[in-house]
Image: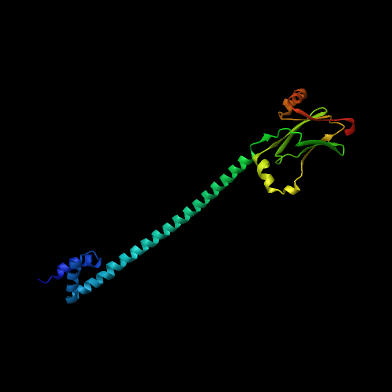
């Protein structure tokens, strides 16, 4: 085989230094470098001038890329955490609203209600299942209209959170027995402008659950 000139080796050196030649070409160049001191020195200089700067550039680029990826990952973690908190808060709020906003009137059952005069005051007691969420009352001339309402929370959840042995009946104090002669129970409109002067209509729509007698005074 004819000896390869230094000019040809010089053309191949950049590709050889970058590792972009075939195994046969690599072997051919290395055989020449083993015999030619000038080409060997040229290859060493090229490695210092080309390989190391390229390597540093790549490493710097990799470092920059990793830093950007780290910042992006941290931002995504924060975003994911914020979204998770928001979703959790939404679920909790939605569940709370679903348990507290819906209301229904508690129907009157003699076994669940009682009216008593205590210290001269007329009081209504509820001893049925669940807790009272809210109560509504309207004061007539000598009669009183009221009803109790429950929500899913007060009816089903709240009783589970309290000690059944310490359970006390719900007590609603109305007014002096000297003034209150009748107590009616049942749903009615709560606006005073709507109710005023319509006690007779309210009495027809509700149920009389207590009437004063001489013994009550």
Q: In the rendered picture of this protein, how many numbered marks are placed on residues?
A: 0
Q: Is residue 137 above or below residue 47?
A: above
Question: Which residue shows up at 27% across the image and 67% down it?
Answer: 50
| Residue 217 visible (yes or no) | no
Q: Quadrant of residue 20?
A: bottom left
How far from the left and from the top, in percent, is residue 25? 18, 67
From the viewer's perspective, is 16 left or right of 106?
Answer: left
Question: Which residue shows up at 19% across the image and 76% down it?
Answer: 34
The quadrant of the rendering that contains the N terminus is: bottom left
Question: Which residue shows up at 75% across the image and 46% down it?
Answer: 167
Which colouring convention does the figure follow? rainbow
Outermost residue on the front side: it is: 111
Q: Nearer the viewer, residue 187 or 93?
A: 187
How far from the left and from the top, in percent, is residue 165? 75, 49
From the viewer's perspective, is 217 left or right of 13?
Answer: right
Outermost residue on the left side: it is: 2
Q: Is residue 176 above or below residue 15?
A: above
Q: Is residue 170 above or below residue 208?
A: below
How far from the left and from the top, in percent, is residue 171? 78, 40
Q: Nearer the viewer, residue 119 or 70?
A: 119
| Residue 175 visible (yes or no) | yes
Q: Quadrant of residue 57?
A: bottom left
The quadrant of the rendering that contains the C terminus is: top right
How far from the left and from the top, in percent, is residue 39? 19, 73
Question: Which residue shows up at 24% across the image and 68% down it?
Answer: 17
């Amino acid at each position: 085989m004819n000896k390869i000139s230094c000019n040809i080796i010089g053309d191949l050196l950049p590709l050889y230094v970058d590792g972009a030649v075939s195994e046969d070409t690599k072997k051919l160049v290395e055989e020449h470098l083993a015999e030619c001191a000038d080409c060997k020195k040229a290859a060493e200089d090229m490695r210092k001038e080309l390989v190391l700067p390229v390597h540093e550039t790549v490493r710097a680029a990799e470092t920059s890329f990793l830093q950007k990826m780290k910042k992006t990952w941290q931002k995504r973690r924060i975003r994911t955490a914020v979204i998770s908190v928001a979703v959790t808060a939404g679920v909790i709020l939605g569940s709370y609203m679903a348990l507290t906003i819906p209301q229904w009137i508690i129907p009157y059952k003699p076994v669940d209600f009682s009216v008593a005069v205590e210290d001269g005051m007329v009081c209504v007691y509820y001893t049925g299942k669940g807790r009272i969420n809210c109560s509504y009352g309207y004061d007539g001339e000598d009669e009183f209209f009221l009803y109790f309402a429950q929500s899913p929370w007060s009816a089903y959840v709240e009783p589970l959170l309290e000690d059944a042995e310490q359970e006390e009946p719900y007590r609603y104090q109305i007014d002096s027995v000297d003034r209150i002669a009748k107590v009616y129970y049942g749903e009615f409109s709560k606006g005073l402008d709507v109710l005023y002067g319509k006690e007779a209509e309210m009495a027809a729509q509700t149920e009389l659950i207590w009437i004063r007698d001489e013994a009550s005074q």
